[in-house]
Image (spheres, rainbow, N blue to C red):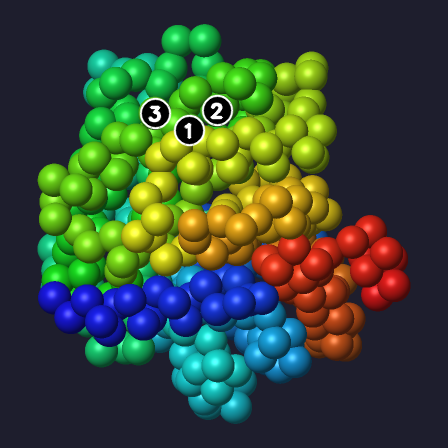
Amino acid sequence: MNIERLHDIANRMVAPGKGILAADESTGSITKRFESIKLESTETNRRDYREMLFRAADAMRSCVSGVILFDETLRQKAADGTPLVDVIKAAGAVPGIKLDKGPKPLPFCPGETVTEGLDGLADRVAEYAKLGAEFAKWRAVIDVSDTIPSFNAIHANAHALARYAAICQAGGIVPMVEPEVLMDGAHDIDRCAEATEWALKETFQQLYHARVALEGIILKPNMVIAGKKCPRQASRAEVAEKTLKVLKRCVPAAVPGIAFLSGGQSGEDATAHLHLMNAAGPLPWKLTFSYGRALQADALKAWGGKMENVAAGQRAFAHRARMNALAASGRWSQDAEKAA
Ligand code: 13P
């Protein structure tokens, strides 16, 4: 393992005042997003949408350190024939690839899943590295209710994350380790804190057993937040405080950076939470964003699938990217939000 190289890539992924664009929706997920703007999910439409984001040149150059791609996009060419990977690299961002094959039902654990995709993974890593990917992502999904998560779900997912991370590092790419505790339920913020702490503790234990070098990973966790159906929604300050408390208990300082998922938060909430945490520094690791929905929702709406709206879509994307870049250095404010 060339740990210096992995450490260098990881540091570029969490460069100061920048964060990651998660554009790795599977074909099924992007089809659902396109349904919201009544757009057919063809290969060309998916390409046009992603190309619009990657060609928002100023925002990409100043706010985006890396982009996570789905297999199809990593192999796609822009309308003018330039590989999309080259468009991303030209903007100074690191290309990454989603490696997992999604969560599948975990037998005898009703309502729980384990993420699959380990078979043949070393070969896939080698191929993606050749295609230009310098990091990868694997998402484990932990659901919360009164009776779950179970030990089996926490353990199976952490074990798979660790095996994936080791395979990535052996193949020369940085693993982005994503244990996501969902915010879909009716649980309160303290129950989320409990589940998140458990999932992170087990994940780092398994990473240790798998001999993964923490200096060459990026952690992509959820924030500690009440479930969407919980009658008591926590304040932004409480989310920031409880998230930092759990991260400080669980994430060794050797990890170069933590890049949050947005998980269904609104664009502005995701920005405000990140800002409050960075403003409460200094912290042992870089803290930034790796948002999908929170970074793209406004852009998708402004674009609406129409060529004539590309500039409007790029403006909406650039605005959210700038707000999150400010949040990544604790310099976001409501005034900045309005001034745009
Ligand atoms: P969201 O920010 O929409 O949660 O997506 C990030 C991601 O990559 C989930 O795996």
Crowding at mark 1 (Cα within 10 Å: few <14, some 14-19, many 20+): many
In the picture of the structure, the residue carrying the numbered disc 2 is: 193
Q: Amino acid at mark 1?
A: Thr
Quarter-wise, where is residue 200 in the image? top left
Residue beneath disc 1? 196
Decide: is 227 above or below 65: above
- Would you say the beta carbon of the disc 1 residue lies within 8 angstroms of ligand 1? no
Residue for point 53% across, 62% down: 19
Residue 288 in view (yes/no)? yes
Observer-nearest residue: 7 or 307? 7
Q: Is residue 83 above or below residue 193?
A: below
Q: CA distance from mark 1 to mark 3?
A: 5 Å
Q: Is residue 151 above or below residue 117?
A: above
Give percent across and percent down for residue 271. Answer: 66, 50
Element under disc 1: helix
Q: Secondary structure at mark 2?
A: helix
